[in-house]
Amino acid sequence: MPSIHRSELPPGALLGKYQHGKAYADCYVTEIAQQVSHAEYVQAFYTTPLFKVERLLLARLLSKPSTDAQASQLASGTLDSFAAWSVEERREDQLLMCDFQGRTRSWLMVIPVEAESSGGTRLYFGSAVVPARAARAGTRTPGLGLSFRLLLGFHKLYSRALLSSAKSRLLRQQPAQR
């Protein structure tokens, strides 16, 4: 399997409800040759140096601060909001977050993978962007907008970079720490 690649959503993915209609949804996947719990993955993802840049921007520009301790609480299921997101739905193997404006979703999932000698883990990361409500109640804009289309290429690269960064962080962790 290539290091990071685009994939179809696996069966039962919480992000699946945003896969159809006028919303945009994507899914990226990688494998790691070690067993990783969902909590370990969530904590690693939200505490990578790359994601900390995003957290800093959210704190400075939108007054939505967050800490590594809060990322740990989110991962363990004792916190339902983190920076600009809140938990929309949670299962033992996945987490679906919604941003404070209700426009975007972030999704993390793990699936154990059986290998010849030892088990590994498949790590999924996906996003969804839903159309904004139009000024008239109950109607939707025809699409996701020019800004979304202009930023889509960056979003795809950034999604791969985030997943790669989380994978690297998990690989660097010593088994004794996990």
Image (spheres, rainbow, N blue to C red):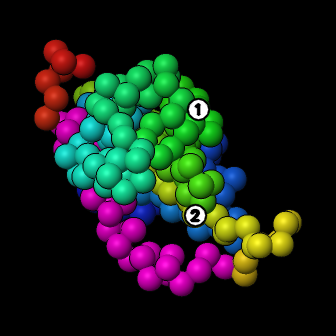
Q: Is residue 59 left or right of residue 167?
A: right
Quadrant of the rendering where the C terminus is positioned = top left
* Viewer-nearest of discs 1 and 2: 2
Q: Nearer the viewer, residue 24 or 29?
A: 24
Q: Which residues are the magenta region?
A: 143-171
**Mark 1 highlights which residue?**
90
**What residue type is disc 2 on?**
Val
Q: Is residue 146 left or right of residue 138?
A: left
Q: Nearer the viewer, residue 72 or 56?
A: 56
Q: Residue at x 58, y 29 (%)?
A: 91
The residues bearing labels 1 and 2 have C-alpha atoms spaced at a distance of 19 Å
Q: Earlier in the sequence, mark 1 or mark 2?
A: 1
Residue 142 falls in image quadrant: bottom right
Q: Is residue 157 magenta?
A: yes
SS at mark 1 in the image: strand
Q: Does residue 31 appear in the picture of this structure?
A: no
By secondary structure, the bulk of the magenta-drawn segment is best described as: helix
Q: Nearer the viewer, residue 136 or 21?
A: 136
Q: Is residue 145 left or right of residue 50?
A: right
Q: On screen, 46 above or below 99?
A: above
**What residue type is disc 1 on?**
Arg
Alpha-carbon neighbours of circle 1 within 10 Å: few (<14), some, or many (≥20)? Answer: some
Q: Residue at x 36, y 41 (%)?
A: 65
Q: Which mark is residue 147?
A: none
Q: Residue at x 44, y 28 (%)?
A: 74
SS at mark 2 in the image: strand
Q: Is residue 28 magenta?
A: no
**Mark 2 highlights which residue?**
129
